[in-house]
Structures are given as structure tokens and as C-alpha cells.
Image: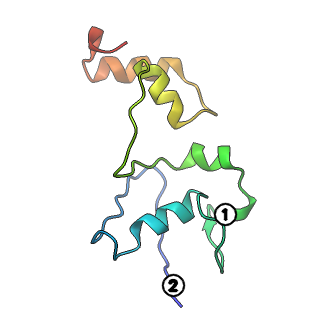
Amino acid sequence: MNRCSLTMVSGKSYAIVGRTGRAGESILIKLLTGMYDNYEGEIFINNRNLREYSYPELKSIIAVVFQNYARYALAIQDNVRLGNILKLDEERILHNKRKMNLGEMVL
């Protein structure tokens, strides 16, 4: 039986890395994001059982970039919205775009 216990702090970014095909990093992430739901034991996020979250709720609190990522032919605002469809914050998107000096480079 494999066990894993970890604590992640809100507002921090984490990278789960390991030897490809051997460390279980992809399985861990797929479990945390609700992509795999056939498991034994319990997974808690914010002291709430993972199985109690809806898929949109999980998407709003966890963002993942897999090795086989996809590119979307969308404006940057639309790409950002894909990361959190529950919280559309136009002003924040524009603020960050200005902060990164992207100007007219991206729409």
C-alpha cells in the first residue's frame, strides 16, 4: 500500500516532479484534480473530502500544466479564463497584462 501525506499552503505554487514513468507524479496530480476517482482511502483539500467537490470547484482551486499541454487559438484573456471559469476578473487580467509589459503583443 502506498501512502502520501503532504501539506500545501494557499498562495504558493508547487511543482511535482520525478523520474518519468516511475515516481507517480502524474497519478498524484490526476488524483488531486479529480481526473482519477477510482481510489482507496481519502484525499482532503481544505479539510474537505475530495469526493465532495464538483469538477468546476476543483478547477477553480487547482491549475495544472501537463507535459502534453495544449495550445488554444484564443486571446490571452480567454486563455486565462480557461484556468478559472468560476472567477472572471477582467480588471485583474488587464492589470497583469500591463504589469508584464505585454501591451499590444497579446490581445
Q: Residue flagged by tag 1: what amino acid is it?
A: Leu
Q: Position of residue 22 (x, y in %)?
A: 34, 76
Classify mark 1: residues with Cα within 10 Å, few (<14), some (14-19) or many (20+). Answer: some
**Residue at the image point whose x is 62% and y is 50% from the top:** 58
Residue that numbered label 1 is attached to: 50
Q: Is residue 71 left or right of residue 85?
A: left
Q: Quadrant of the N terminus?
A: bottom right
Residue that numbered label 2 is attached to: 3
In the picture as drawn, the residue positioned furthest to the bottom comes out as: 1
Q: Nearer the viewer, residue 31 or 104?
A: 31
Q: Is residue 60 left or right of residue 15?
A: right
- Please determine whether, in this image, residue 52 is positioned above or below residue 60: below
- Separation of residues labelled 1 and 2 (CA atoms): 16 Å
Q: Position of residue 30 (x, y in %)?
A: 52, 61
Classify mark 2: residues with Cα within 10 Å, few (<14), some (14-19) or many (20+). Answer: few
**Residue at the image point whose x is 67% and y is 49% from the top:** 55
Q: Is residue 68 left or right of residue 1?
A: left
Q: Nearer the viewer, residue 89 or 37?
A: 37
**Residue at the image point whose x is 46% and y is 29% from the top:** 80
Q: Residue flagged by tag 2: what amino acid is it?
A: Arg
Q: Which comes sooner in the sequence, label 1 or label 2?
A: 2
Dot 2 lies on which element?
loop
Q: Position of residue 38 (x, y in %)?
A: 66, 71
